[in-house]
Image (cartoon, helix red, strand yellow):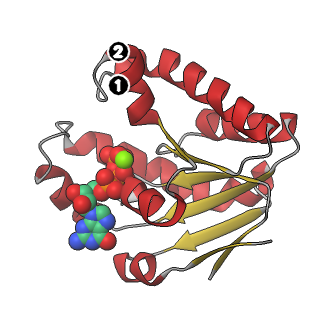
Amino acid sequence: MISIPEFALVALVGISGSGKSTFAERHFAGSVLSADHFRYLVAGDENDQTASSDAFDSLYHVADKRLAARRMTVIDATNVQQHARTAVLTAAKKQHALPVAIVLDVDEDICWERTQARPDRSFGRPVLKRQRRDLRRAIRTLAKEGFRRVFVLSSPEEIDAATVTLEP
Ligand code: GTP
Ligand code: MG
């Protein structure tokens, strides 16, 4: 069971195709800020990586407003790179929210299969491989980095069976 403190900033952490957006919609609908959505808002294309910097600026602007109003917030982005997680931790610290990480650790082959079946994703396998390598490192360091609770779901079955409770 995943127990989320009342006032948290939750980072989903996982490679593309691991099911972050699916998980976010299922468990956190209405509280999710998605990097893809902000790329779409600033550039009209959720896959335009050249828009990432503007997209994350905008996303964290909104996150700060939400947190200032003490609204629990979930960041739907890969968050496999340390600089991405630093942004999460900085945003949480500024508004005294508890930083939480939920890792979706799904086998690369499964993610690749899903990715190939998606019309909205066109990157090659090396991109996934790089994300995977970053993820391995991330899993080891999340707690040290400052995430106060770290949940690791290690298979599609575990992800499917996960329940999320918001602490009153
Ligand atoms: P990116 O946005 O590219 O980083 O991927 P993501 O981590 O948000 O993955 P997303 O939730 O979009 O899921 C990727 C694909 O896998 C979609 O086509 C989903 O329908 C599918 N998918 C997600 N979760 C599951 C699952 O538990 N089982 C199965 N079979 N498919 C899933
Ligand atoms: Mg997604």
Residue drawn at (46%, 75%) of the image:
154
Q: Secondary structure at mark 2?
A: helix
Residue 139 percent location from the top left of the image: 60, 60
What type is the residue that disc 2 sits on? Ala
Task: Establish if 105 lies above or below 93.
Answer: below
Q: CA distance from mark 1 to mark 2?
A: 5 Å
Mark 2 lies on residue: 43
Residue 36 percent location from the top left of the image: 38, 34
Residue 137 percent location from the top left of the image: 57, 54
**In the image, 55: left or right of 113?**
right
Mark 1 lies on residue: 40
User: Looking at the figure, which quarter contains the C terminus?
Assistant: bottom right
What type is the residue that disc 1 sits on? Tyr
In contact (CB < 8 Å): disc 1 and disc 2: yes
Residue 17 seen in the current view: no
- Corner quadrant of residue 93: top right
Residue drawn at (43%, 65%) of the image:
26
Residue drawn at (15%, 49%) of the image:
118
Residue 98 percent location from the top left of the image: 81, 54
- Corner quadrant of residue 44: top left
